[in-house]
Image (cartoon, helix red, strand yellow):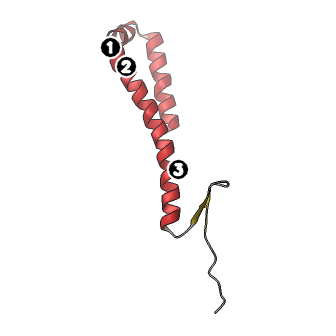
Amino acid sequence: MLLIAASLALLFLVALGVSQRFRASVARHRLGVAVVLFGTAGAIVFAFVASDYFSIDACLDDGGRWNKEREVCEYQEPSSAP
């Protein structure tokens, strides 16, 4: 996802530098461009936070214990003692 966002940002910058009509359009719609850029940045940050949350949630749902220091899911071995 980060690669896609970086590619789109690069494409935007190239179009901004090459096309005079594109620059004029961006100048007219500054608020819309700002909303799109900040929205994209927010979506990227949210995706990173949400992926961590869902990893931890899946670990706990499977009966594991989340180790914050190592950032791994740990499962307890079943004891064979009667």
Tell me the tag on residue 29. Answer: 1
Task: Name the residue at 64% across, 83% down.
Answer: 79
Q: Which type of secondary structure does the marked residue at label 1 adopt?
A: loop
Task: Name the residue at 50% across, 44% down.
Answer: 49
- Compared with 7, 25 (above or below) is above
Q: Which type of secondary structure does the marked residue at label 3 adopt?
A: helix
- Give how far apart the Cα atoms at labels 1 and 2 are: 6 Å
- Compared with 27, 51 (above or below) is below
Please state which of the two labelled residues, at mark 2 or mark 3, is closer to the viewer.
Answer: 3
Write down the residue under mark 2.
Answer: 33
- Give how far apart the Cα atoms at labels 1 and 3 are: 35 Å
- Measuring from the top left, give residue 28's x and y in whole percent: 32, 9
- Compared with 73, 8 (above or below) is above
- Measuring from the top left, give residue 36's x and y in whole percent: 38, 25
Is the residue marked by circle 1 packed among few (<14), some (14-19), or many (20+) residues within 10 Å? few
Question: What amino acid is found at the position of numbered circle 2 in the picture?
Answer: Val
Is the residue marked by circle 2 packed among few (<14), some (14-19), or many (20+) residues within 10 Å? some
| Viewer-side residue, 65 vs 41 | 65
Could you tell which of marks 2 and 3 lies nearer the N-terminus?
2
Q: Are marks 1 and 2 in contact (CB under 8 Å)?
A: yes
Question: What amino acid is found at the position of numbered circle 3 in the picture?
Answer: Asp
